[in-house]
Image (cartoon, rainbow, N blue to C red):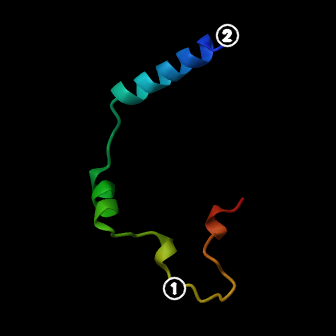
Amino acid sequence: MGRGRAKAKQTKVARELKYSTRNTDFEALQRELSGQSNDHQDEDRSDDYDDGYDDYRR
């Protein structure tokens, strides 16, 4: 009991994701699939104490 609203909300979100049309950036998709990257993460890390996860910490 009590799951009706939660299930209805999940169903609504699932339908929106399935049927909504979004603008797809095919160039970014192609870069991602081909392994090319223009991100700053590929920079040479000269700091010995830098573990590369500073961008993900809050």
Q: Quadrant of the C terminus?
A: bottom right
3D distance between C-alphas at marks 1 and 2: 56 Å
Q: Which mark is residue 1?
A: 2
Q: Which of 49 and 1 is in front in this view?
A: 1
Q: Nearer the viewer, residue 38 or 2?
A: 2
Task: Examine the rendered structure and indicate whether residue 12 appears above or below residue 4.
Answer: below
Q: Which mark is residue 23?
A: none
Looking at numbered disc 2 in the image, what kind of residue is underneath it? Met
Residue placed furthest toward the right: 58
Q: In which quarter of the image is the N terminus?
A: top right
**Residue at x-position 59% and y-position 89%:** 46
Q: Is mark 1 on a helix, strand or loop?
A: loop
Horizontally, residue 24 falls left or right of residue 13, namely: left
* Residue 25 picture location, percent across and down: 32, 49
Q: Is mark 2 on a helix, strand or loop?
A: loop
**Residue at x-position 34% and y-position 61%:** 32
Task: Examine the rendered structure and indicate whether residue 1 appears above or below residue 16.
Answer: above
**Residue at x-position 28% and y-position 66%:** 34
Looking at numbered disc 1 in the image, what kind of residue is underneath it? Asp
* Residue 9 picture location, percent across and down: 55, 19
For the residues labelled 1 and 2, say whether their Cβ atoms are less than 8 Å apart. Answer: no
Residue mark closest to the camera, 1 vs 2: 2
